[in-house]
Amino acid sequence: MSAHVFSFADLHLHALPSGGLFIPDHKTLVVSDLHFGKSDRIARRSGTLIPPYENTETLQKLDNDIAAHMPTSVICLGDSFDDLAGADALDDTHRATLTRLQAGRQWIWIEGNHDPGPVDLGGTHMAEVTIGTVAFRHIASLDTPEVSGHYHPKLALAGAGRARACFIYDKTRLILPAYGTYTGGLSAHHPDLRSLFAPHAIAVMTGRKAIPVPLKR
Amino acid sequence: MTLPQTFTDWFAHRGWTIHPHQQEMLDRKDLPALLLIAPTGGGKTLAGFLPTLTELADGQHKGLHTLYVSPLKALAADIKRNLRTPVEDMDLPIRIEDRTGDTSATQKRRQRADPPHILLTTPESLALLTSYEDAPRMFKGLQRVIIDEIHALSESKRGDQLMLALSRLDALAPGLRRVGLSATVENPQAIAAELARHPDTCPILQADPGPDPDIQMLVTDEQPPWSGGGGKYAIPAVLEQVRQHKTTLIFHNTRAQAEIFFHNLWLANEDALPIGIHHGSLDRAQRLKVEAAMIAGSLKAIVCTGTLDLGIDWGDVDLIIQVGAPKNVKRLVQRIGRANHRYNAPSKALLVPANRFEVVECVAALEAVKDYDLDGDPKGPGPRDVLCQHILIRACAGPFHADDLYAEVTSAGAYMGLDRAEFDDCLDFCATGGYALKAYDKWKRLLQTADGKWQLRDPRTSRNIRMNIGTIQDTDTLKVRMKGNFKPLGEIEEAFAATLTPGDTFLIGGQIVRYDSMRELSVQVTRDAAKTPKIATFMGTKFATSTQLQHRILRMFQQDKWPELPVHTAEWLDLQREISKLPQGDRILAETFGFDQREYLCLYGFAGRNAQQTLGLLITKRMEDIGLDPLGFVATDYATLFWGLNPVTDPMPLLEPETIKDGFEHWLSGNAVMKKTFRASATIAGLIERNLPQARKSGRQATFSSDILYDTLSKYDPDHLILQITREEALRGLVDFGRITEMLDRTQGRIDHVKLTRISPLAAPMLLERGKVAVAGNARDRIMEETAALLMENAGLSQLPQ
């Protein structure tokens, strides 16, 4: 298994190399910050026309994770769309893929700061959900234990090339990496992010294998 | 034409007579294009401006008359100062202003409303001016364009951008005359063809080049070391030269080498001679201070890099020292020209080879200078990423017809071969992104109006386009600040900063500093008392030795004896001939030998450092495939040395041209150089926006690496225009596959395999070279796992619940 397996509150979790989080006991897959429609929004706002392939690529990744783990529930942990018009940027092929992935399973869109309202793409729109004692919401709060996204944490290890997206967790809080293709990141050492965690926190690098590494204090 | 009386009087008053080439520039001032080749200090600038001054002397011309474009902001300011003298002396009714990135916004607005007679600017500022809707009014009466240091601009995309801007000016001001001012170059015809409006001709005027330079190799008591590039051994001799001369410029090939040399120079500088340092990574304020000190004549020497290559008058330089082989004869000649700015005095220069092989290279370069054999690689056609930017700039200025723009663009020499289909691809890229997936129907950047003209969909996007103007690729750099001190010391590349851990020491601005922390976008350091820095270098460009110089070295190897070489170097070559062979131009020498439980292969391709490096990557891949278990390689300008677990019994299959070419295609797509090149071209073409510091600071989560765009585009749209451009660029740039092809063509499969029982004299220094590349398919993942495991262990976390 190339995932990193760990206990968190009353849940057993698998941090997947893709950046998704799988909860086997609840057959639930959680992904955060998909940012569908990013290139569309940039084109609309600034005129710059970056390669419009991120929706295809992100859906492909999601398709692979769902095929591998066969979850009965999928939770998209907010900022699934780069803005509310981002859903319009999905073409017919994308919509068909999404419908296929949603078929036969519960699909929850948690609201994020980029996508505060519902979209017409099936699934349920919610502010947050709770599994066991753990809350799943977009932005970290004081109400723990919780799993959130929003910060797009990333980390570089000396000698190992460019920074990669990573999970960060301690005993009460877990922040997921951004799952979307066109997403940058905030260094795990940045005070805004680091201060959310206890001194003994662990980062899990994404890539070909999920690799845990202690975060410097 | 005869010089007006006022001017004759002025010349007489200064005690000058007009130089023949200045008179000739005046006589031929009405030609549509003219190129002047003159050495530094030959009154080149005045030659360029005399026709303008005489035409403006009667005060009849209204508005802009002459546009002066130079590669450096500082040069524009310098020229403004110098032009003021004749204008004030003769009381001419001429307004002269400069316009660069440093000019205030108020001043810039005023210049557009009421332009001066002479405007001094840079290619980027000019491109920006042509993007405004009022450009036609501003440039209407323009008579002349003077391009200074055109040889320097011509070497980069800045020259291509400038020539496209001129094609635009030509449409706005028909009959515009073009003048180019150039230092000595190997192929003036090529520059003339770029300068002239196609199909105009462009005569070339050669000013008297002055006496031959006095150039020699610096003789030192100590022998140069076997490897390395620092030239540290020569420091006592260099200090002695500095003592004996008024002002010495000490040139280095890289910033890192300049820093290390400067540091060591000061350690040995017992007389505390005033010596400064000047290079592109230093903070602007620091550089200005050194420049001012130099003009004031208060410095004995300056350790510098290419940033001092261009023609600003730095005062009384009487000696040039070049540390490290010059790699390129043309650059050497231009550098030597910096000494003795007085016309008709010979320039004096000394070459300091940094290691034993460079002794050979320096001698070859000296002979090339004597023979006046300058080198340079022919340029390819005008780059299309620059054209894309030009199309967007044109769109900012207002609606246009594609036919008109195509006619304008192909009037620029570099783009005269551009066919309509290529142009239309670039236009389509600007309008729709040019993707196979037509995703931007709603949000096209350019739309076609009912009358067939192209215009911006949203005029507000012109702001973004303007902010993106330019072709200079700024690497992401971070300012280095002394703790508790606001003033930055200089800049280092972000990639270098990422490798630092607190406590590491490195050199910047000649001092050793200790890395403490990263704050915002600056690197916090404290002074460190150490004698040698822990990390010796930060990244710098490594120049490859030119093809012409390599051929000269190969010819030299065929001599029976080498009276022109120092004894130690001649003996070294003799020994190589005795034990193995000396490499020949039309064959590849392959040596194999065992040493210290490793099997070595040394391939002498003489293709230049970048190409030898590429060759190293390609051949180790091939060695892996056929089970030779390579462990690593190292490349220099003349050879690549491989080591592994198994001996290479037959090097032939490794050097099959077909295998190398196939391997190259495959390897190239995943290479980091490609990503770097992609980023540069994509930024120029407007596919991505320049990474502005404010965007980096505020939108940390919003900005993402261009590598992601490269990977995605390669996967879903491999034939996209920008990927085509990236491939073309990579072949010419750091990957330098062109030189590998040159090597294969010249050797035609003739390989001499010499099996040795010991290391050959030529290969030995390579074992000491820095920059060894380890071969490991999954090295990165492995390093990461090992590092992570160690960290977990140290943190007592290795027994996590699984």
Image: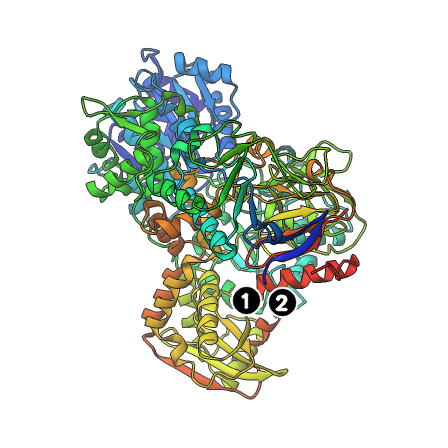
Answer above or below: position of B566 versus A114: below
Q: Which quarter of the rendering shows the C terminus of chain B?
A: bottom right
**Distance between the alpha carbons at the discs numbered 1 and 2:** 8 Å
Query: Residue at left 38%, top 58%?
Result: B373
| Amino acid tagged 1 | Val
Q: Is A70 positioned to the left or the right of B769 in the image? A: left
Can you give x and y, in whole percent of width and height, for residue B384 in the image? 32, 42
Q: Which mark is residue B359?
A: 1
Can you give x and y, in whole percent of width and height, for residue B155 in the image? 40, 45
Q: Is A74 positioned to the left or the right of B243 in the image? A: left
- Report the chain holding disc 1: B
Viewer-closest of A199 and B5: A199
Find numbered disc 2 in the image and state the secondary structure of the residue it sits on: loop
Query: Residue at left 71%, top 54%?
Result: B264
Query: Marks 1 and 2: CB-CB under 8 Å?
Result: yes
Instruction: Give a yes or no on whether discs 1 and 2 share a subunit.
Output: yes
Answer above or below: position of B601 versus B289: below
**Classed neighbour count for the residue bearing mark 2: other residues with Cα under 10 Å, few (<14), some (14–19), many (≥20):** many
Q: Which quarter of the rendering shows the N terminus of chain B?
A: top left
- Tell me, yes or no, if residue B213 can be seen here: no
Q: Is B289 positioned to the left or the right of B430 in the image? A: right
Viewer-closest of B599 and A117: A117
Find numbered disc 1 in the image and state the secondary structure of the residue it sits on: helix
**Classed neighbour count for the residue bearing mark 1: other residues with Cα under 10 Å, few (<14), some (14–19), many (≥20):** many
Q: Which residue is mark 2?
A: B224
Can you give x and y, in whole percent of width and height, for residue B255 in the image? 59, 49
| Amino acid tagged 2 | Pro
